Image: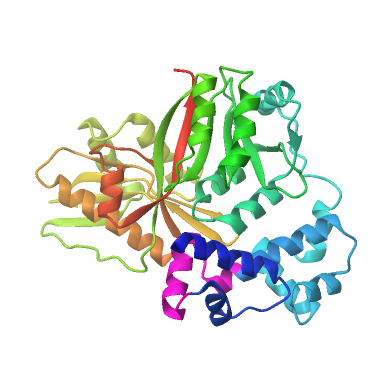
Amino acid sequence: MENKELINKAIGFIQSNPKDNLSLQRIAENAGFSLTYFDAMFKHHTGYSPVEYSRVYKLTRSALELRKTEKTILDIALDFGYSSPESYTRAFKSFYSLTPSEYREKYSDKPIGWQDLSGKISINNFKRSFPELKVSDLELALDFCFTHNPLKYAEDMVNMTVTETEILTLGDPEHLEHFLFVSDYDYPEPAVMLICENEEDAIPYVKLFAKDRKLIFSVRRPADEEWERFDAEIAKSGRTCKFGYDMMYTADTVDVPKYDGMSVRELNENHLSSIKAFKDSGGCAECHVRAIQLHFSGKGNPGMRPLGIFENGNLICIALPYLDKVRELNRYDIGAIFSLNSKSEDKAIELIWKYAIHMCLKEGAVIGNANAFEGTYPLSIAASERMGLIKVAKNCGYAIR
């Protein structure tokens, strides 16, 4: 069998034995892997070690029991292999930032109720246009992403938690196997992302969307799979695909180079004059300077980590990576890299890339480059691969063109 099939077999084994505290050796033997190779390969595919994945699966499935049943916390703890309610509570709070009792009180018998603000007008219009879709909720959507592929869905998990979002499905809203998350950025039309693991689940959504030819939507497909029937259905709908790849760094270390006369620094308020001179030289746009200024003032994205490369005292390269946190996932997005056209440009870009990765590894974060495209720019597919990132998902956007 291919590695991916063996990993899926291991995941199935974990999910079939939620009461057991599975060891790495037992999971590896069931999948038919050697012990040392299996641990690295499993983490490469899922972002978790096998034992960590088993723990996350137990916690997310136990959360569903808290929401949907009247079982006692003791019974749920024992059902999922915990020796006591206290050990279960410690593990649950570490993951959800709530005790099981607090979680049950907050989420039982109702989906997460997003406020009916004016910013959700386009989402509500979308729901009225597709009454076939049933409402689910954010916690179940996050559970799906964590227990299926947290590397592949890292970008989605971040987006679901930082925007006004509605979770909708053609399936069972209480046991999600595929869904849409629809987010509203106050644009006339919402952003629509289809989350599913296989082609057969995706096709009914394309057929549903055929009645609205103006609708633009995206699907994060496996990086190494062809969806021929899905693509045929897309062609029938008159849509075309624009695609990029979500990239992830899967090594544990990075060598940060040293170049004479060149240094990398984390930018702060004292560097504003250099940042403005960089912009005036054509390095970036005014909106990027404003974003950095907002960050310095404490009003912007608190996860921004602006970096700069200085050569002989002059700022020649800027990066705007972001660190976002969803449950236990620290997700670090390389974000944007801008450089001045100079003799040292290639060295500056390599240095700022690798320093950003170095910063990320110190935070214990998954490093991502969302939606890389073909080309020669600093965040292209080729540039990402040179730095050690791999393709984890093919991000396809569909529209009438």
Image height check: is 168 above or below 334?
above
Quarter of the picture containing the C terminus is top left
x, y percent for residue 371:
41, 41
Foreground of the two, 83 or 37: 37
Q: Is residue 342 left or right of residue 70?
A: left
Q: Is residue 213 left or right of residue 372?
A: right
- Residue at 56%, 23% (x, y): give it: 187
Q: Is residue 51 magenta?
A: yes
Which of the 4 image quarters holds residue 355?
bottom left
x, y percent for residue 302:
50, 49
x, y percent for residue 385:
29, 52
- Residue at 50%, 46% (x, y): give it: 155
x, y percent for residue 122:
65, 23
Q: Is residue 252 left or right of residue 83?
A: left
Stretch in magenta: 33-53
- Residue at 79%, 73% (x, y): give it: 79
Which of the 4 image quarters holds residue 143?
bottom right
Whether residue 78 is visible here, answered yes or no, is yes
Q: Is residue 217 magenta?
A: no
Foreground of the two, 303 or 353: 353
Image height check: is 343 above or below 329?
above
Whether residue 370 is visible here, answered yes or no, is no
